[in-house]
Amino acid sequence: MKRTAQWYFFVVSVMGLGIFFMLHLGSQLAPPVSPPSTNFVAHSTEHLADIGDSSFSASVEANLQENANDPLSRLFLQLFVVIAVCYVIGWIFTRCGQPAVVGEMMAGVFLGPSVFGLLAPHAFQFVFATSSLGALRLFSQIGVCLFMFAVGMEMDVAELRYKAHTAVAVSHSSIVVTYFLGVLLALFLYGHLAQPGASFTDFALFMGISMSITAFPVLVRILQDRSIFKTPLGSTATACAAVGDVTAWAMLAFVVAIARATSMGGAAFSLGLVLIFVALMLFVIKPNLPRWLGQPALERREPSKAVLAVVIAVVLASALTTQLIGIRALFGAFLAGIAMPTAGGFRDKLVVRVENLSSILLLPVFFAFTGLRTQIGLLSSAQDWFICLIIIGVATAGKLGGSALAARLTGMKWRESLQLGALMNTRGLMELIALNIGYDMGILSQRIFTMLVIMALVTTIMTGPLFTLFGRKRQIPAA
């Protein structure tokens, strides 16, 4: 050990002295002369001369400012701010009896121009400069794709057949009723709330789909937090939300295909490609994927790197295919999740890994990016807020009322039917995803986008209180 230490200090000392000696010799050399035609070198020499003439504090300040404006530094700052704020507000909402994801959704609005931009405009412009939002948008899209992949894995289509009667009746009734009300509402809102250039058909279809979605993951979290996930009501609500989500996303895929097509022939071709791809994923990839991966690989405690590489390849290929078809990459990620094998708890092992990355890092970025598009200040008149209240009321009446009535007709008691309706009225993150698609496609204006974001937040927040209210048993007065 002593000999090793001596050798170490000898090598370090000799090399260090050699470096110092060469730097001393080099400092006495004449600087290179820049050619007259090389503007970059002349500029660099001038810049170095300025630094040499300036004070130390000014040089440090200039370096820090330059480093802070670097795109990578800006992205790290944005991620730090987004994750910290989402975690704090999510924790506050959990203390108030709400799921953490509701607080994270609200944090996105706080980080946008409605709160952060209003209270600290200069800091807001520095953190979320318009020129730096491209990378943040890509991160948000990746987060949504991973989230949809996890949602697909959480849906066990095989178990739905045990409650197919109630699930199909309740979910499809709530979707049809709310979709009808959304299209009816679009008749009155199209003239002054649609994006200029958007057709009425596209606007009405997006109004209907945005009001009829149920957030399956948020609903599951609420059931788990209240310890009723395994109860008959919990399993029925889960089945209804799963069927509703699959139906709603299929409808949204068709709506996107129709909205992006320039002609009826183009729309029919896009829809045909969608049907072919869905059939390929469900009837080719899904049955054969367990055999391709191998049973021992599925039953391993920790998936191997090779297996994870295959899974990632399937997700990326599926997302790329739907993106090329024109119905967004998130649909492909969702189908890839449904196609994942269930043997040996394989899905559970993948969900843990995917959710840890998406829920902690990437989904908060999506919430923040949505919040940057939400400008509550645009609702500046009493008429705007009145329209917003109407949207909330119509969406709640259609989803809660349609679900409760359908559940009652299938034989459930009124109390449980109303509780089920309250759960189905949860929109959450799934609603925000649909709204961002409509905004990106130039169908929803920023004002109606803001109104629908508020509707999504309000209907999700009211789920817990309404569920508790409908669950209370009436006290029978004593004779």
Image (cartoon, rainbow, N blue to C red):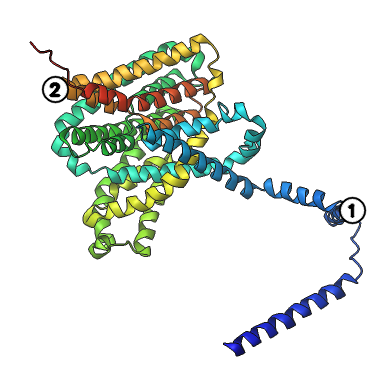
| 223, 425: nearer the viewer | 223
Residue type, label 1: Asp
Report whether 31 appears left or right of 373.
right
Q: Residues within 10 Å of mark 2 (few under 14, many from 20)?
A: few
Which residue is at a point 89% across and 60% down the rendered structure image? 34
Q: x, y (%) of residue 270? A: 39, 36
Q: Tell me the amino acid under the disc marked 2.
A: Lys
Where is residue 252, by image quadrant?
top left
Q: Are marks 1 and 2 in contact (CB under 8 Å)?
A: no
What's the residue at 44%, 46% (across, down)?
360
Q: Point out the tag, 1 or 2, that comes first from the N-terminus.
A: 1
> Could you say where residue 344 lies in the image, as x and y percent from the top left?
22, 57
- Of 129 and 262, nearer the camera is 129
User: Which residue position is annotated with label 1?
Assistant: 53
In what element is the residue under mark 2? loop
Residue named by callout 2: 413
Q: Quadrant of the C terminus?
A: top left
In the rendered image, the residue lying farthest to the left is: 479
Q: Quadrant of the N terminus?
A: bottom right
